[in-house]
Image: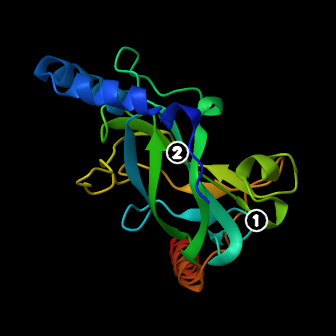
């Protein structure tokens, strides 16, 4: 059975007074302005949690490859309000997670769908966003994994995004244009050194032989 907050419960006499208030054009206008102001105060914005087409993969420094797809790694969107009077990126510690986490759909790539951030005024305007990634085995959130020095974790840069308006009518969610890739690493773990490819080794061999021939001809 649905329950309602006390603020939504009106006595009959209160309801009659409210309806009488609304019959007056001036009072109706005041109420409409108040409702609009409340909507603006608690505005929202939507963003697509996806790095598809953005050249910003999630990279595993332990393997020197893009992080594997599936549930081994998780990503989540983080948000902080934009202040036009102080338009600088916020302290990373002030960002909070928006919506549920997501997994990688193909190596290095996440596509978690739309997320809705609150406290964006007016609705569908600017907000600061960041993507954080972590090894799922060490927690259901980035903060949990961060407490374990063995966990592979990483963050993107913090970017300003023009969000979508959830409406009605809704507009297209904002895109994480300018987001950086994420390098997953454990605390104190040095980055891996990729092995040279066979093609590169071949070029080096040819160059070395050329140097040796030139030296022999000169001597």
> Mark number for residue 32?
none
Instruction: Say what secondary structure mark 1 lies in.
Output: helix
> In the figure, residue 71 lies in which quadrant?
bottom right
Left or right: where 93 falls relative to 210: right
Q: Residue at x 60, y 49 (%)?
A: 3
Observer able to see residue 154 = yes
- Which mark is first along the chain, 1 or 2? 2
Dot 2 alpha-carbon crowd within 10 angstroms: few under 14, some 14 to 19, many 20 or more:
many
Whole-percent x and y of residue 79? 52, 40
- Residue denoted by label 2: 130
Instruction: Say what secondary structure mark 2 lies in.
Output: strand
Whole-percent x and y of residue 82? 41, 28
Observer able to see residue 121 = no
Whole-percent x and y of residue 182? 58, 55
Where, quadrant-wise, is the N terminus in this rendering? bottom right
Q: Residue at x 20, y 19 (%)?
A: 27
Badge count: 2
Q: Residue at x 52, y 64 (%)?
A: 57
Asked if labels 1 and 2 touch by Cβ distance under 8 angstroms, the answer is no
> In the figure, residue 29 lies in which quadrant?
top left
Dot 1 alpha-carbon crowd within 10 angstroms: few under 14, some 14 to 19, many 20 or more:
many
- Residue denoted by label 1: 136
Left or right: where 171 falls relative to 15: left
How was this image coloured? rainbow
Whole-percent x and y of residue 52? 41, 68
């Amino acid at each position: 059975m649905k329950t309602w907050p006390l603020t939504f419960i009106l006595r009959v006499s209160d309801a009659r007074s409210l309806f009488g208030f609304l019959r007056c054009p001036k009072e109706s206008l005041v109420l409409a302005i108040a409702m609009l102001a409340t909507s603006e105060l608690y505005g929202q914005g939507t963003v697509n949690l996806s790095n598809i087409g953005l050249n910003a993969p999630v990279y595993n420094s332990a393997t020197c490859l893009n992080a594997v797809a599936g549930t081994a790694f998780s990503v989540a969107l983080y948000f902080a309000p934009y202040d036009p009077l102080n338009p600088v990126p916020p302290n990373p510690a002030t960002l909070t997670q928006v919506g549920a986490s997501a997994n990688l759909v193909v190596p290095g790539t996440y596509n978690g769908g739309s997320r809705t951030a609150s406290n964006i005024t007016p609705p569908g305007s600017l907000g600061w966003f960041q993507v954080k990634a972590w090894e799922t085995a060490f927690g259901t959130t980035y903060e949990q994994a961060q407490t374990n020095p063995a966990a592979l974790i990483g963050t993107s840069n913090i970017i300003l995004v023009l969000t979508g308006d959830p409406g009605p009518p809704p507009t297209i969610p904002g895109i994480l244009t300018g987001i950086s890739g994420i390098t997953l690493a454990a605390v104190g773990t040095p980055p891996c050194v990729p092995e040279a490819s066979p093609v590169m080794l071949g070029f080096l061999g040819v160059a070395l032989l050329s140097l040796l021939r030139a030296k022999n001809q000169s001597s």
